[in-house]
Image (cartoon, rainbow, N blue to C red):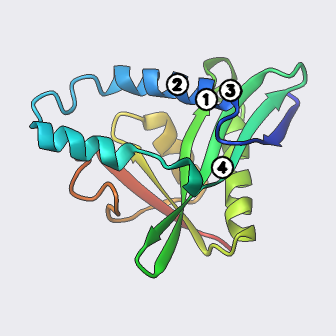
Amino acid sequence: MTVRLEQVDWADPRAAALRDALDAEMGDRYAHVGRSATPEEQAARARAFAIDPATMTSVRLAIDADGGVLGHAALRRLQHGPSVEWELKRLITVPAARGRGVGALLVRAIEADAAAAGATRVILQTGDRQPEAIGLYRRLGYRPVPAYAPYAGVIAEGLYFAKDLA
């Protein structure tokens, strides 16, 4: 399969459509999570998952030879006081392209973007009901790390990974 990567703005309608598809898929996988949460807990979850587009430093789309969009990944600059972390966000591959290396291609592009921005590692948050993502991250050299802000203490089903960049 021929795939090219395209750098786009966060607001690109193709990127937004893939993020909407990801939200729908994750909504199905995690439908029961948080149902018994208090309104304060629900608000904390919403804040943890909120994304300020101004913090997104790279958004990549994987495009097939016919111009069809196959996947999406983004890089977020997280500021924690004086320290900065670079977080892989919103990785999705369309169902028809899964298992064909598109996700790995996108992750490597985001890692390169992070390295070009001066990052020494990339972090990410995923969930315990996403075995495909967990497997991909492990295959690409990501290792488990403790929960980090804004998810720590808020997202019980969260799993956290990091990869040191060469």
Q: Residue 5 location, x and y as percent?
A: 82, 41
Residue type highlighted by circle 2: Asp
Q: Is residue 147 left or right of residue 23?
A: left
Q: Residue 9 location, x and y as percent?
A: 71, 42
> Which of marks 2 and 4 precedes in the sequence?
2
The residue where tag 4 is placed is 107
Q: Label 4: how many residues lie within 10 Å, few (<14), some (14-19) or many (20+)?
A: many
> Which of marks 3 and 2 precedes in the sequence?
3
Residue type highlighted by circle 3: Pro
The quarter of the picture where residue 90 lies is: top right
Quadrant into which the C terminus falls: bottom right
Indicate which disc residue 69 carries. none
Label 3 to label 4: alpha-carbon separation: 21 Å
The residue where tag 2 is placed is 20
Q: Secondary structure at mark 3?
A: helix
Q: At 21% across and 57% down in the image, what residue appears? A: 153
Total marks placed: 4
Q: Is residue 84 above or below residue 130?
A: below
Residue type highlighted by circle 1: Ala
> Which of marks 4 and 3 precedes in the sequence?
3
Label 2 to label 3: alpha-carbon separation: 10 Å
Q: Residue 8 location, x and y as percent?
A: 76, 41
The residue where tag 1 is placed is 16
Q: At 12% across and 36% down in the image, what residue appears? A: 37
Q: At 16% across and 43% down in the image, what residue appears? A: 41
Residue closer to the observer: 40 or 112: 40
Indicate which disc residue 13 carries. 3
Q: Label 2: how many residues lie within 10 Å, few (<14), some (14-19) or many (20+)?
A: few
Q: Residue 149 location, x and y as percent?
A: 34, 62
Label 1 to label 2: alpha-carbon separation: 6 Å
For the residues bearing labels 1 and 2, Cβ distance under 8 angstroms: yes
